[in-house]
Amino acid sequence: MKQIALLGATGSIGDSAIDVITRHPERYQLSVLTAHTQWQKCAHLCARLQVPFAVLSDAHDAADFLNVAPNTQLYFGPQGLIDCLQHADTVITGIVGAAGLAPTLAAARAGKTLLLANKEPLVCAGELVVQEAKASGAKILPLDSEHNAIFQCLHHGVLGAGVEKILLTASGGPFLHLPLDDLKHVTPAQACKHPNWVMGQKISVDSASMMNKGLEVIEARWLFDCPAEQIEVLIHPQSVVHSMVQYLDGSVLAQMGQPDMRTPIAHALAYPERISSGVSALDFSQLTALTFMPPDLTRFPCLRLAYAALQQGGLAPCVLNAANEVAVARFLNHELAFTDIPRVLEKALSAIATPCHYDEETIFEFDALTRTYTKNLAV
Ligand code: NAD
Ligand code: MG
């Protein structure tokens, strides 16, 4: 019986993970759920699923929480996200943003099996997360659909000598065909309306700007120890091929399926076995054409900036990520135009000089410094 800590249980990844896990009560037990603002949703889940431990960001919600879920023991705040890990052998990371970095690192250090959806920690500190996992023997399995697809197309997830490149697919988001001049007027509601996936707000805006694909290039770099030159982004508007691996002999392997996160979650949970996920198979007789094209970097400057940050190395991706988190929050708050997002990133990357050598403390320092710099930045 696997004991699972589900970090970010109240979000979109949380919903999908709970759906898969509760289909297999003989294999998986939810031992920890964590919530940020949605303590009510978390309390009802804990009561219904008899979850023994939960983590809340705000201790003020404890009394109301315990009225709903009296048998659940509570932890609080950032330290709680780390302390709760002792009750699990498998950790699903579904927190959004760098807020998930400390628990991800702690889980890697503690030798847990890590099912990673939360990509921002890999962007800020991928080298460190992977090193810590290696040192402790922690297994890392990607949940991000593209990385899970790549994992499936590689031999046991390892990039061997015969691999020529990774073909990372991207839907292109809701603004793939919008006239360029209209981009500056798009609203948060339009940006959050992804054509193929239902996800949290932040990743939806990132998908619209293609920053999400930029973050995923950096994520792939660390997950598969693959240089940026071997990672190629391809627009594939139908989101049927979730990514591909091209081999030396001319073979290209693709993983295909419905755009539903329950598939990669089920894959990673059961690996190397297979379990049902609740997702139906593709019906190839009903599929329309599958199309592919290179991304337009004038339309999607965020993707160019992500490659540039990766090239620069060190903490440049950490600065890029923190600047993006702030810029997206300001866009969602109607403080910035959609087209201001890459401007904020560009300014932060050129204003903040980062060291090549860093440790964990420096990562948090540059994350905080970048947030302060970008919070009121005029563009
Ligand atoms: P979401 O906004 O729906 O949920 C975010 C979760 O994080 C919530 O449970 C919230 O309680 C928690 N959270 C937010 N801020 C927190 C903080 N400061 N401290 C503690 N907890 C906090 O987001 P999502 O769409 O589920 O995405 C979660 C992560 O998974 C992101 O990193 C995203 O890039 C990645 N991801 C999501 C999808 C998807 O389909 N949703 C696909 C691939 C990768
Ligand atoms: Mg993805």
Image (cartoon, grey):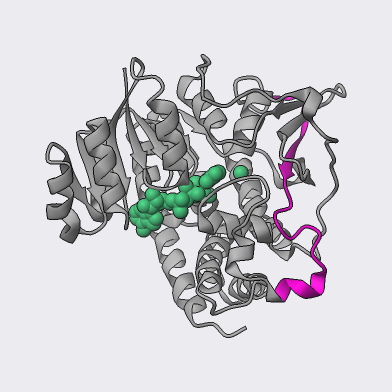
Q: In which quarter of the image is residue 179?
A: bottom right
> What x and y, as percent, mark residue 229?
76, 45
**249 relative to 72 in the view: left or right:** right
Q: Where is residue 114 in the image (x, y as percent from the top left)?
A: 43, 33
Does the magenta segment cover residue 369?
no
Q: In which quarter of the image is ligand 2?
A: top right
In what quadrant of the picture does the C terminus appear? bottom right
Q: Is residue 30 above or below residue 58?
A: above
- Whole-percent x, y for residue 369 in the image: 44, 72
Q: Which of 160 and 87 is in front in this view?
A: 87
Q: Is residue 171 magenta?
A: yes
Counting from the top left corner in percent of width and height, residue 202 is at 53, 58
> Which residue is the extreme one toward the bottom?
378
* Magenta-tinted stretch: 160-184
Whether residue 131 is visible to the viewer of this picture, yes or no, is no
Q: On the rendered structure, is 184 left or right of 2?
A: right
Q: Is residue 187 above or below residue 28?
A: below
Residue 152 quadrant: top right
Q: In the image shown, does 17 or 312 lie closer to the viewer?
A: 17
Which residue appears at 50% of the width and 17% of the height?
A: 275
Identify which residue is drawn at 36% across, 38% down.
Answer: 6
Q: Tell whether 40 sits left or right of 74.
A: right
The N terminus - image quarter: top left
Q: State the residue at coordinates (12%, 47%).
A: 67
Q: Is residue 338 visible?
A: yes
28 vs 187, left or right, is: left
How many marks the image carries: the answer is 0
Judging depth in this view, the residue of 199 and 164 nearest the camera is: 199
